[in-house]
């Protein structure tokens, strides 16, 4: 078995940290390793966010959100708005409420609470993904030999297990982070998880924050139009419920407050759908950039 592990926190922070985001939040590669044990080829890069408390920062490039003049936590007059340290993050600890209001489950969360909750969930996803992938491969291998398979037929098969992340957007106090997990053997599977956080407001951002109160109609119209354009350009592409309705599969119906998205370099939300969610599996994960309406 070959293993190379970087779990020294000080070294990881020195080698893995990205530039400070508005002096408020940074992303570190806290654990990075590659492991081969005969059955598995595992490559893992685990991110961790670190929030610096009692800091204010700003940039005119940060996307503005409904109900706030700027997302960086400083008003247009230059005065720092008063905050009560509350936080809302649906994926982390409870339901997100509309309009930037705090939910009962997340009321009173501090910067340290946000940091701990997000990092704990990321680590749980990573650990669960690796454990489940190994379990599935072990069951497959056992069944293969139990049904008469030979070592020669097995041919040294292995499973690729990967975990990685990408910072999609970093301006002012806003961070958009994508965590991806992949396993490849008999069939390939990729899952992605998204974190869109405004640490100045101590909460997770929503499509409503970026697109306004009419976000459902704005996003739905854009997504349907993009689906039709893609299908017209390539006859092999099919979007259930929009360009194909005879199969009876619901496919795309509408975005809602739970729809996955990340923020791209232009500050626009990019809505994401997993494999088989709105289209056949060969089309993979589907992404649709939604241009933000003029302020």
Image (cartoon, rainbow, N blue to C red):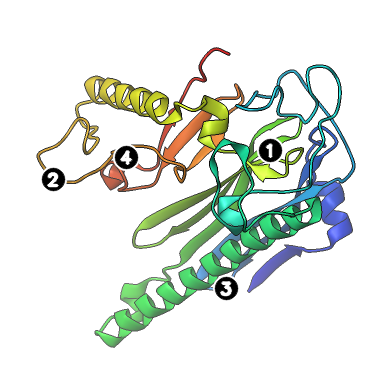
From the image, tell me which residue sits under label 2.
248
Q: Quadrant of residue 100?
A: top right
Frontmost of labels 3 and 2 is: 2
Can residue 134 be seen in the rendering of this structure?
yes
Q: Distance between the residues labelled 3 and 1?
A: 36 Å
In the rendered view, does 32 fall on the left or right side of 168? right
For numbered disc 4, what is the local secondary structure? helix
Q: How crowded is mark 3: few (under 14 residues within 10 Å), some or many (20 or more)?
A: few
Residue drawn at the location 52% of the way across and 32% of the way down: 208
From the image, tell me which residue sits under label 4.
283
From the image, tell me which residue sits under label 3.
37
Precedes in sequence: disc 3 or disc 2: 3
Give residue 221's position: percent from left, percent from top: 34, 23
In the rendered view, does 123 fall on the left or right side of 239? right
Q: Residues within 10 Å of mark 2 (few under 14, many from 20)?
A: few
Q: Is residue 18 depicted above or below 92 in this figure?
A: above
Frontmost of labels 4 and 3 is: 4
Residue furthest top in the image: 294
Frontmost of labels 3 and 1 is: 1
- On the rendered image, what quadrant is the C terminus found in? top right
- Mark 3 touches mark 2? (CB < 8 Å): no
């Amino acid at each position: 078995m070959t293993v190379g592990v970087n779990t020294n926190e000080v070294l990881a922070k020195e080698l893995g940290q990205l530039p400070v985001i508005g002096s408020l939040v940074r992303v570190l590669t806290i654990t990075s390793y590659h492991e081969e044990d005969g059955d598995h080829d595992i490559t893992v890069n685990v991110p961790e966010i670190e929030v610096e408390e009692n800091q204010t920062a700003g940039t005119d490039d940060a996307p503005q959100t409904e109900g706030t003049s700027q997302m960086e936590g400083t008003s247009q007059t230059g005065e720092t708005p008063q905050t009560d340290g509350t936080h809302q993050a649906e994926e982390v600890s409870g339901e997100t409420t509309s309009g930037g209001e705090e939910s009962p489950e997340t009321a009173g969360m501090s910067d340290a609470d946000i940091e701990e909750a997000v990092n704990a969930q990321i680590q749980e996803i990573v650990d669960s993904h690796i454990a489940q992938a190994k379990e599935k491969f072990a069951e497959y291998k056992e069944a293969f030999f139990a049904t008469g398979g030979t070592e020669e037929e097995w041919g040294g098969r292995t499973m690729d297990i990967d975990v990685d992340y990408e910072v999609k957007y970093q301006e002012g106090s806003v961070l958009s982070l994508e965590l991806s997990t992949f396993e490849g053997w008999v069939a390939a599977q990729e899952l992605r998880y998204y974190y869109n956080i405004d640490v100045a407001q101590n909460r997770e951002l929503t499509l409503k924050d970026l697109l306004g109160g009419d976000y459902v109609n704005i996003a739905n119209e854009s997504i349907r139009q993009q689906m039709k354009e893609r299908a017209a350009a390539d006859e092999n592409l099919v979007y259930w419920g929009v360009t194909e309705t005879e199969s009876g599969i619901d496919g795309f119906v509408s975005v809602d407050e739970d729809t996955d998205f990340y923020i791209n370099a232009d500050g626009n939300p990019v809505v994401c759908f997993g494999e088989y969610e709105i289209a056949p599996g060969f089309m993979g994960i589907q992404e649709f950039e939604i241009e933000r309406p003029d302020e």
